[in-house]
């Protein structure tokens, strides 16, 4: 029996829609978009983008006068803009501009520039909305310009001035940061910068002045091709140079942590052994910092997700993935105490972390040195964290730092009068709670530390 | 054919000629500055290893398959 459901996020564009048929994601093209699609296909435009790994590849699997069906390459885990580190966000913005320039030069244009049109696959930013292209009409301005500013330039400039937390704003403002708000959040000196003044402050003013266009005067304005290319090029140059002025929470974590080299090696040896025995192909490392431990795994992994709360750690991971060509790793920013929720219409447009990770169904979950943060900083009980881990992974490799561990001591001491409340934090309580959901297969003390590694199997 | 499924913003459409003019001046002056620096041997080579330039490398293989 075939089981077809329309994708709940794909309803805005009349050109076509995404649907899921027997678990496989497909894209239907409606007759209204046939002309564009044929032109994109026959001119070799799609092929050039595929060859450069800029657009997700697809095969045409069905074609009639009523519909054409494409089957895009499967991407097993989609990350959203509010889960990207600064340089990932930059990469997505630059990809969009690169595609727009290429499109204009070949008689097409991007009709939208939503940050949700991009995700990460095989270590690189890739455009996933195949139907975003339309014919370029000579001397017409870029319709998606405002969207580009509110989805990409805005969050990046805010992150530059106020820190990487600003990148999470798209979680609240799915259709981009409101221009007036964006302009008001930037420091005064940005008004003296001709690039930022024209692209953000002046744009906000113009939008405010013309926000009641009921006559459809939009079509009246003109812009030469050269002028549009100048806009795209200057956006590219500016964003490429943009940087972040903040140091990491964990940046040199492995230097300040209480691990000697030998303990570190011992830990990675055990993990390697277990992962090998489990024959793990897919995994998620929760609180995986810059992916150090995942890179130490010798078994060949198909796909490893590495998430961390710290933007800089994820950023560092992203850079390493690009230099080392570790295309099997997908890094993203995640606060385990507040994982991304389902948002959008009917809460069905962007899926929660839990929904996506359950669909991904990793063989193994790694949770190294996170339990004390969850329990002591987040006040999450052992029972709650056990239930969380048990909800998406068959096997769990979890590290438990005992009360004597210096990080645990530090966290406990910061509780001052409230410290007695955390008396529950000990090995016995941990094991008893986790035993409700897991079977403890193996337990190893990491020599030279006050930490224990567990291998557990979900019940 | 443009499907108006989102509002491009009238202000945003009109302003693009101004933004483009500013961009042209910036790009032009950047170019001049680069040439002056290059003349004195001061130009730094772009050594960004994470991001390349905006141009898509075109292959001249056959363009018929999708």
Image (cartoon, helix red, strand yellow):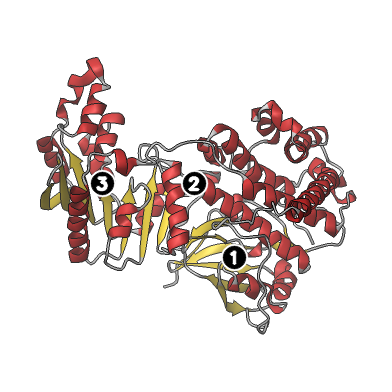
Please name the residue shown 78% across and 58% down the image: B2
| Residue A228 image position (x, y, % from top left) | 80, 54
Dot label at residue A54: 1
**Left or right of B21: which side holds A299?**
left
Residue with the mark numbered 2? A85
Q: Secondary structure at mark 1?
A: loop
Could you tell me which chain the residue with mark 3 belongs to?
Answer: A
| Residue A371 image position (x, y, % from top left) | 25, 39
Write down the quadrant of residue A66 in the picture: bottom right
Q: Secondary structure at mark 2?
A: loop
Please name the residue shown 31% across and 57% down the image: A294
On whether disc 2 and disc 3 are found on a single subunit, the reply is: yes
Measured in 3D between alpha carbons, the distance from the residue under mark 2 to the one under mark 3, in whole angstroms, is 21 Å
Vertical position of residue A322 compared to residue A207: above or below: below
Who is closer to the viewer here, A436 or A3? Answer: A436
Question: Disc 1 or 3, which lies upstream in sequence?
Answer: 1
From this viewpoint, is residue A352 visible? Answer: no
Please name the residue shown 27% across and 65% down the image: A298
Who is closer to the viewer here, A351 or A125? Answer: A125
| Residue A307 image position (x, y, % from top left) | 38, 48
- CB within 8 Å, label 2 to label 3: no
From this viewpoint, is residue A212 visible? Answer: yes
Dot label at residue A368: 3
Q: Secondary structure at mark 3?
A: loop
Vertical position of residue A185 compared to residue A369: above or below: above
């Amino acid at each position: 029996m075939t089981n077809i459901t329309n994708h709940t996020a794909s309803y805005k564009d009349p050109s076509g829609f995404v649907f899921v048929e027997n678990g496989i994601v497909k894209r239907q093209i409606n007759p209204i978009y046939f002309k564009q699609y044929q032109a994109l296909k026959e001119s070799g435009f799609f092929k050039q983008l595929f060859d450069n790994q800029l657009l997700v590849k697809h095969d045409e699997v069905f074609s009639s006068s009523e519909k054409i069906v494409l089957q895009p390459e499967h991407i097993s885990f989609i990350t959203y803009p509010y889960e990207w580190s600064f340089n990932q966000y930059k990469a997505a913005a630059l990809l969009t501009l690169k595609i727009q320039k290429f499109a204009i030069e070949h008689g097409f244009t991007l009709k939208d520039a939503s940050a949700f049109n991009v995700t990460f696959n095989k270590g690189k930013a890739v455009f996933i909305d195949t139907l975003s292209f339309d014919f370029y009409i000579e001397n017409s301005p870029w319709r998606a310009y405002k969207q580009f500013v509110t989805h990409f330039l805005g969050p990046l400039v805010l992150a530059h001035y106020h820190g990487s937390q600003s990148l999470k704003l798209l979680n609240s403002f799915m259709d981009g940061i409101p221009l007036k708000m964006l302009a008001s959040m930037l420091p005064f000196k940005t008004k003296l910068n001709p690039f930022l003044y024209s692209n953000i402050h002046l744009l906000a003013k113009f939008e405010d002045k013309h926000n009641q266009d009921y006559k459809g005067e939009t079509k009246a304005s003109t812009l030469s091709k050269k002028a549009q290319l100048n806009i795209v090029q200057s956006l590219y140059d500016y964003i490429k140079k943009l940087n972040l002025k903040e140091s990491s929470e964990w940046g040199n974590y492995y230097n300040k942590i209480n691990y000697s080299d030998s303990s570190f090696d011992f830990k990675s040896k055990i993990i390697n052994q277990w992962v090998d025995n489990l024959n793990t192909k897919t995994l998620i490392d929760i609180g995986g910092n810059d992916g150090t431990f995942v890179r130490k795994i010798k078994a060949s992994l198909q796909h490893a997700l590495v998430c961390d709360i710290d933007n800089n750690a994820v950023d560092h991971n992203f850079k390493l993935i690009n230099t080392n060509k570790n295309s099997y790793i997908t890094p993203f920013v995640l606060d385990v105490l507040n994982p991304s929720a389902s948002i959008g219409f009917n809460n069905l447009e962007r899926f929660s972390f839990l929904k996506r990770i359950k669909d991904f169904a990793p063989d193994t979950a790694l949770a190294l040195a996170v339990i004390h943060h969850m329990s002591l900083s987040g006040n999450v009980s052992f029972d709650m964290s056990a239930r969380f881990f048990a909800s998406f992974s068959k096997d769990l490799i979890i590290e438990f730092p005992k009360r004597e561990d210096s990080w645990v001591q530090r966290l406990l001491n910061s509780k001052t009068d409230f410290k007695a409340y955390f008396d529950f934090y000990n090995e016995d309580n941990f094991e008893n709670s986790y035993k409700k959901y897991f079977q403890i297969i193996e337990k190893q003390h990491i020599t030279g530390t006050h930490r224990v590694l567990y291998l557990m199997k979900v019940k | 054919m443009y499907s108006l499924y989102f509002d491009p913003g009238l202000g945003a459409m009109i302003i693009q000629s101004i933004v483009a003019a500013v961009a042209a001046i910036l790009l032009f002056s950047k170019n001049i500055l680069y040439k002056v620096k290059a003349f004195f041997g001061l130009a730094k080579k772009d050594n960004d290893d994470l991001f390349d330039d905006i141009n898509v490398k075109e292959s001249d293989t056959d363009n018929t398959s999708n």
